Each structure stands twice: as structure tokens, then as C-alpha cells.
Amino acid sequence: MHEPEIEHPACSGIAVLCFHPSDTPASLGGRPFSHFSGHFIALPSRTAFILQGLPSAAPPALHPCLFSKSSQPSLFWTISISTEPSEPPRAVLPNVIQDIARGDFVRLTTAYDEWIEDGPGSHGSCRPNCPDNSPCVDNQGRDEQHADNGSQMSLDFECDSIKVDDDARGVMARYFKSEKFHPDCLVCIGQMTLGGLALS
């Protein structure tokens, strides 16, 4: 007998993310950051999660009527979420977008349907500079994100404050003791909401 899928309510709290600089400069096609590590504390339960972000292996293509392909103001991350460093992730979100237009005050989100290319089809409403025969998005641009346990997931992070230089070093010494400090590390502190993740 098929068991109904359990819906887990969204949980919100405080997240601290540490972004590590890339070895390849942006002028040579490199990303601003090679990876990031993070901690998320869900409130009021105070359940702690460990976050690891790596560049997405197969990111969606941003729609050409929104952004130039030579200067796409976004990055995609694959984010793993776990509760213990030695245990496998409880969930993996394969394509979470970072809006580069926000600068160092990083925003991460899974809600980006309107930014990416849809599959072949007819035009919908579109900006005037959309290339001919380039399909517009109609909220069908990405597959639903699913956690490893089968429940649909969402993620949103809004940075409230940043730490750089010696301030970043201090935060890393407290929260990221096993990671090597680099002068160009960026620490972002802000509000995070996760939807669809079981807390128990």
C-alpha cells in the first residue's frame, strides 16, 4: 500500500556561511568563490545543520532576454545538508541560485523559475530584447527540488551582515575551526528558511 508523502513545514533561523575564494580569477573565467561551508540553527528548536556548497555540475541556462550569457549575474550551487560531519547528507539541493547582483550580501534561493530558459515551445510574455525563437519561461524552467528522503525542499537565505579580514578570521576561528583562513574569505550572516526538511 502506497504511503502518503509526509509534508514537513518550513523552518527558519540563523545561518553563518563562509565563502572561500577561487584560485582562478574572474578575468580568466573563474568563479568568485570555489565553495562554501555553513551552519544553520533552526529556531525555536535550535536544531543545528551543517551546510556544504559546491558549484553545480549541470546548472540551468539563464534566459537570454534577462541576462547576457557573457555576464550572467548568477551562480548555481549544489548544497548538502547534514547534522553530523561524519554522516551522509540528509538532503542535497542540486541547483540553488546565488544572485550576484546582491554583491557580498549574498542571497541564495531555489525560487528562480522566471530567470531560466524553458524547453522548446512558443513565446509567452517577454522583454523586447528576447532573441527570435528563444522560448520564454512559464514557471516550468526547473524540476522540483527533492531531498534524498523524497520530500520536496526549498531554501532561501538573505544575508544581513558580512565579515571580512580580521572579523572573518574571528568568525572562522569560532565556527569553522577545521578550515584554513584566506584573506579573501567572506563570511555572511543572515536569515535562512528551509522547507521540506524533517527535523526529527
Image: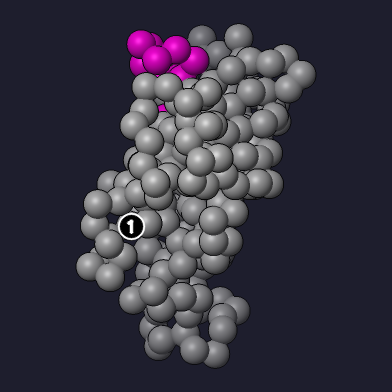
How many numbered markers are drawn? 1
Picture quadrant where residue 84 is located: top left
Q: Is residue 5 above or below residue 22?
A: above
Q: Is residue 125 left or right of residue 132?
A: right
The question of residue 79 being in magenta is answered with yes
Q: Residues within 10 Å of mark 1 (few under 14, many from 20)?
A: some
| Residue 142 magenta-highlighted | no
**Residue at which label 1 appears:** 31
Task: Provide residue 152's location: percent of width, then percent of height.
Answer: 55, 32
Judge whether 159 appears above or below 74 on screen: above
**Magenta span covers which residues?**
77-90
What SS does tag 1 mark? loop
Residue 13 visible within the image: yes
Q: Is residue 91 visible?
A: no
Residue positioned 37% across, 22% down in the render: 178
Q: Where does residue 50 sit, x and y in percent of width and height?
A: 49, 23
Q: Nearer the viewer, residue 82 or 35?
A: 35
Amino acid type at image mark 1? Arg
Q: In the image, is 91 to the left or to the right of 29?
A: right
Q: Residue at x 47, y 85 (%)?
A: 130
Image quadrant containing the C terminus? top right
Residue at (27, 62) in percent of width and height: 25
